[in-house]
Image: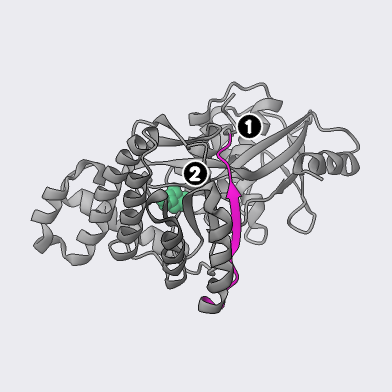
Amino acid sequence: MSQFELVSERHITQFGTKPEQIIHGPGRVNLIGDHTDYNDGFVLPAAINFGTDIAATKRDDRIVRVLAVDCNNETVEFSLDDIHFDENKMWVNYIGGTLLALMKAYPNITGADLVVTGNVPQGAGLSSSASFEIAILKTFAGLNSIELDGIEAALMGQHAENNFVGCNCGIMDQLISALGKENNAMLLDCRSLTFQHAPIPEDMALLIVNSNVKRGLVDSEYNTRREQCETVARYFNKKALRDVTLKQLLAAENELGAELVKRAKHVITENTRTESALTALQNNDMLKMSELMAQSHNSLKDNFEISTPEIDYLVEIIGAEIGSKGGVRMTGGGFGGCVIALTPKYLVEQIKQKIDATYQQQTGLKEEIYVCVATKGAFNR
Ligand code: GLA
């Protein structure tokens, strides 16, 4: 049964009626441009065919009732006028935080009955939370006939993460979940919030490998990296690292110290690589993509220091199979999670076999592999 059918059926058994609407919010994978979004920089993600589905019916009052199929069929009921952080049910906070952000602009929305399920692997760095937030926003916008656009929705999702859930993330995940386009990645300018499409060549696949490395300390390390970037921008009296050049940075090496310089160097060079990747994809130049993705991985590993030996191993063995016919790198926040490979479709089986034959033996962990396509964002009509 598809997720769509599942939420529809469960809505009938739980609430006694067919849902008025079923909304899908996709997860995402980032092809290149990591830890650049909160530096007002560039990212190049794609929405993927894994996501969150919500079946919903509007209510006349301010009550929200939710059945979360993936959380042991847990249910909650709360009022839109009484939303609190719930330490024991983290998943509810994504709904509460997102609705608070929506109600800042649209205070008079009504409640709803919801059934939620999703297939984005959680904690793997494929934005299960952004897909949930964007699906919630699209659901309530639809039920309340609100003309919300994708950028507005993305900002609300990010606001919920930053101010309610407690993660200091940038805007990439929510933007691409809202605005993604079929068969395309997107170059997003995280300062102007404008974007350009980057076609994924028809003969190429998005192969995602989940290392299954347990991602401890992610939030604290993420926030530390973000603070380090902001410290360097402040040193130069600039709004963000986007405005600092490599030359300026290297000239200040003695005053800033080696660690801060490495962090900022990653961001500044990653911005350049990400803009170049747009052109490379538009020209179907896989040799260039191969170089850019390899440089990005090495910079995340050596300058930003957020890779792990397991991830490096995956990048090494996949890279050896793909050569210069595509690219491979770690993707997302770091400290585990996934590797993204842009590979000719005819190599997919060969890569799978290679990973299967060596990864577990080498690391003691079992990988998961997803062959994805780029899909439409929830707000992209
Ligand atoms: C996480 C955050 C994003 C972005 C990436 C790193 O996914 O949610 O905003 O910063 O890490 O590129």
Identify the residue under disc 1.
Answer: 138
Which mark is first along the chain, 2 or 1? 1
Q: Is residue 98 above or below residue 254?
A: above
Left of 186 or right of it: where is 108?
right
Residue 240 seen by the camera: no
**Mark 2 is on which residue type?**
Asp
Q: Are marks 1 and 2 in contact (CB under 8 Å)?
A: no
Left of 6 or right of it: where is 274?
left
Give x and y (percent) for residue 130: 56, 45
Give x and y (percent) for residue 94: 61, 48
Give x and y (percent) for residue 135: 64, 38
Q: Quadrant of the N terminus?
A: top right
Q: Determine whether the residue tagged by mark 1 lies in a helix, strand or loop.
A: helix
Residue 52 seen by the camera: yes
- Judge whether residue 344 is colored magenta: no
Taking the spot 58% from the left edge, 29% from the top edge, the residue there is 379
Q: Is residue 72 or residue 341 the one in the foreground? A: 341
Q: Quadrant of the C terminus?
A: top right
What is the distance, in whole Å, between disc 1 and disc 2 at their CAs? 15 Å
Taking the spot 31% from the left edge, 39% from the top edge, the residue there is 275
Identify the residue under disc 2.
Answer: 173
Taking the spot 89% from the left edge, 34% from the top edge, the residue there is 17
Q: Is mark 2 within 8 Å of ligand 1?
A: yes
Q: Determine whether the residue tagged by mark 2 lies in a helix, strand or loop.
A: helix
Q: Is residue 233 above or below residue 63?
A: below
